[in-house]
Amino acid sequence: MSQNVAGKKPVSQPALGSESFWHKSGTRSVLASLVAIIIGMLAGSIIIIAVGISHGMGGTTIWDGIRLIFGGLFASGRDAAGNLVFSFNPSSFGNMLFRAMPLIMTGLSVALGNRAGLFNIGAPGQYLAGTAASLFVSLSIPNTVLPTWLIWIIAFFAGMLAGAVWGAIPGVLKAFLNINEVLACIMTNWIAANLVTWMFDSSNLKNMLEGTKSGYIYKTSAILNDVSIGGTIQTVGETIPENAELIASRGNVATAKMGLDSIFSGSQVNGGILVAILLAVIIYFMLSRTTLGYQIKACGANRFAARYAGIRDKQNIVMTMAMAGALAATGASLYYLSGNTEFFWSTYQSLPAIGFNGIPVALLAINNPLGVIFSSMFMSMLQICGDRLKELTAYNEFITDVIISVIVYLSAFMLVIKTWITKLQKGKGAKK
Amino acid sequence: MDHEEVVAAGTAQKQAAADDYVIEMLHITKEFPGIKANDDITLQLRRGEIHALLGENGAGKSTLMSVLFGLYQPEQGEIRKDGKTVKITNPNDATALHIGMVHQHFKLIEVFTVMDNIILGAEDTKLGFVQRKAARKKVEELSKRYGLTVDLDAKVEDITVGMQQRVEILKMLYRENEVLIFDEPTAVLTPQEITELMQIMKGLAAEGKSILFISHKLNEIMEVSDRVSVLRKGRYIGTVNTAETNAVELSRMMVGHDVQLVVDKAPANPGKTVLHVEDLHVPSRLYKHDAVKGVSFDVREGEIVCIAGIDGNGQTELVFGLTGLEKPSKGKIELNGQDITHAPISQRSKAGMSHIPEDRHKHGLVLDFTLEQNMVLQSFEQPRFQSMGFIKFDEVRSYTERLIEEFDIRSGQGPITIARSMSGGNQQKAIVAREIDRDLPLMIAVQPTRGLDVGAIENIHKQIVAQRDKNKAVLLVSLELDEVMNLSDRILVMYEGEIVGELDPKQTTVEELGLYMAGAKRQNGTKEGET
């Protein structure tokens, strides 16, 4: 074993810092991610072409489809002649940021777990825990008792705490009973789904602010009249009078817009995206600069060596899982406290996709917290492209799901792609 | 077939007998990214000889054998079998050419019987049924012919390491291999078993088998081999007849300069007790019983106490119990008067214990971390390396650079080298440097020189003696008898979880030590002292 390693001992030792920018491991990783993305987009284009041909759609429609796959974010409709118009679209940009917000958090959650050698597939359950806690708190404290901004803050931290507790459960099972965290996470996911359904079903919060819409815990704020739901502007003011009194006492908990609504007019974006980005930066510095991050990484890379060195590996695992859970749940808090989102309470048969999407986000970002910001934005951009594709062409939005799955698939091959890049660079180096 | 063999034998006789090579590896060059692991190496194995392959860690022995086994493809050079050029692209090709290998770590299935292990992968079948009777007869014949006593119906997990090795040899013979490669076969054996193995190897050679013997133990090579080829840093240094050389010359060839084979040290001058162990019991990971059964001893300032014994007699568990990796089930451990029996590892560190672990890859290093990250594995929380929870990267860097300089740790990129990419010897040097530099009253060193070459061993032994001379207490656990005899001031022999004897290295012999290690002899004093 050690002899094999020894056999590769360099004969000539390269001077310190002789690696150029393009030959750095980090650069190669980023390039590998970009290659995965490009192959994914090309695969999407091929499907556009294939579907187009099999349905006899004609060259213009197919070309429109491909253009929307790559540039859907900038599509702003069709002109009088029926040609696609591309320009800066503030509403699309804003919605991209809004959708990226919870994804950044679940992506951070999975990335942090991966850095600690733990596969946190429990992000959906932690996200649900955060959803339930933040909605329960924000809907049950009357705004006559506390100012709405304070309710928001309490609800935000309640969500975070609930996620931490929910994430700590698989952590405890792993650390002290040596139960695989993947199994425990999957179990806690479904326990969360059923628990949350039961909690809302037996509560009086269900449809509190929106009597006409059956089965939804409606937004935490019903005072705003015009809100954008799922990308389209809806007026909901008419439905209010039924329980106006209740709304007057319970509503109006919503994330501050922080001026983002004027930059990205017509979108759902709010200050939550800034909170998410700030948290990503904090996690980045925590991992790379602090003793806490050093411990987490040491436990992740070699639990036995960490234990040998006196690092308390069990406590570390529990703490890391609690942090990961808190991050995922924070995504839910930010999303559902926005004031313009709805939560379908009867969730026992399904888990939130945003939780699972944290996995490809983290993979694509190579578990780098700063990379998570960009990979989340990219994933939500693809969703926007899908929406545009549906609106502006005969295609449906599911083609973007194919692209995402191809990218997820390729991110599993990231190491192989990285090796290709290394070889390619070597080949070039030899020619010189 | 017979006719051909006669013809082949005839042609061989026409040549000078010395040139009858069964395997020739000519001008082999194998490169890894940025490294020449084998640089124009030629190795010629005569029929019926025992040919030793000697070299330091990282000299390229393993790579060369991997090339012969078809695991790596060389960039240059050719391999000849019986004078004909052959292409070996995978291990199956090697097997087809009747080349077999006994690996350092045996490749046996523990829950299978000896018989099943021998025929596994080479079963003769009729209509899909394994022909056990015929196979058994063949194995029994082989075992008788070469004097390889094994219990064919015993499960591998129940037999001794020495017998497991004989099973591995039988596996090769059952496959009718002519070229047998032994990769450091003596590392796990007792002195008596080593003698036995040497006899078996000589017997095999006398029967016409050709043996490649990989080792860096000079006395074994001197005893058993006919010729020795020496590699150094991927290059071929030369081949000599064993009868015409000696250990000093061989070590010079291997290392490139003169090496002191015996540790030079002044008599010990022990002071007050640092480590006090009383009736310690430590549970076994694998079985329900205790692996350490009531061990008591002291280690004092300024002495090196060595725990000797055959692998698997509770030494590992004893160290786990002392260092906190495993909870003792009974007993008491005191370090400088402080009871640390149940203290967490970090507290033992603070109380003054450093630890060179047995398994450098599992415990000693975080292989995917850089060298500098590894150097502060225990000390990253000390104020000199962090403030307010933020790591002081400059401090870590300059600290690592100092240790690299002082302990001659060689690596590709200095402090930022990934530990995994370093050679085994340098990984070990890094651990030793880290633990010595912590400058604590007690150092527990488990097989600190395992798998290292003569030069590195000399260096580490000097460091350990220097620690002792600085009035530190050293507890050394070693399986190497030379190390035990050379380095220790007192020897405690462990057998089946108990200390069966305390010996003075100046007044004992390797043979006597071997008897204690094998459980054939024990001192009554130890038992009486307990009651």
Image (cartoon, helix red, strand yellow):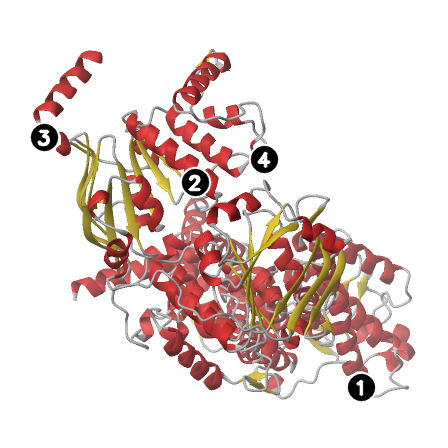
Residue A11 appearing in the image: yes
Badge 4: chain ID: B
- Please tell me which residue is depicted at 47% across the width and 30% down the height of the picture: B167
Q: Identify the amino acid type marked 4.
A: Glu
Residue at the extreme left: B14
Establish if B375 lies above or below A362: below
Query: In the image, what residue type sits under mark 1?
Result: Leu
Viewer-side residue, B316 vs A238: B316
Q: For residue B165, which numbered disc appears in the image?
A: none
Q: CA distance from mark 2 to mark 4?
A: 21 Å
Against A338, residue B244 (above or below) is above
Tag 1 and tag 3 share a subunit: no
Q: Which residue is mark 3?
A: B16
Whether the residues at callouts 3 and 4 have beta carbons within 8 Å, the answer is no
How packed mark 3 is, by other alpha carbons closer than 10 Å (few <14, some 14-19, many 20 or more), is few
In the picture, measured across the screen, residue A139 lies left or right of residue A88, that is right
Residue drawn at the location 32% of the way across and 71% of the way down: A22
Q: Which residue is identified by label 2?
A: B194
Q: Which residue is mark 4?
A: B157
Q: What's the distance in space between the residues labelled 1 and 4, CA to CA?
A: 66 Å
Can marks 1 and 4 be said to lie on one chain? no
Q: Are marks 1 and 3 in contact (CB under 8 Å)?
A: no
Label 2 chain ID? B
Which chain is indicated by disc 1? A
What secondary structure is found at the residue carrying circle 3?
A: loop
Q: Position of residue B234 (x, y in %)?
A: 25, 56
Quadrant holding the N terminus of chain B: top left
Please say whether residue A179 is visible from this viewpoint: no
Q: Which one is earlier in the sequence, the residue at label 3 or at label 2?
A: 3
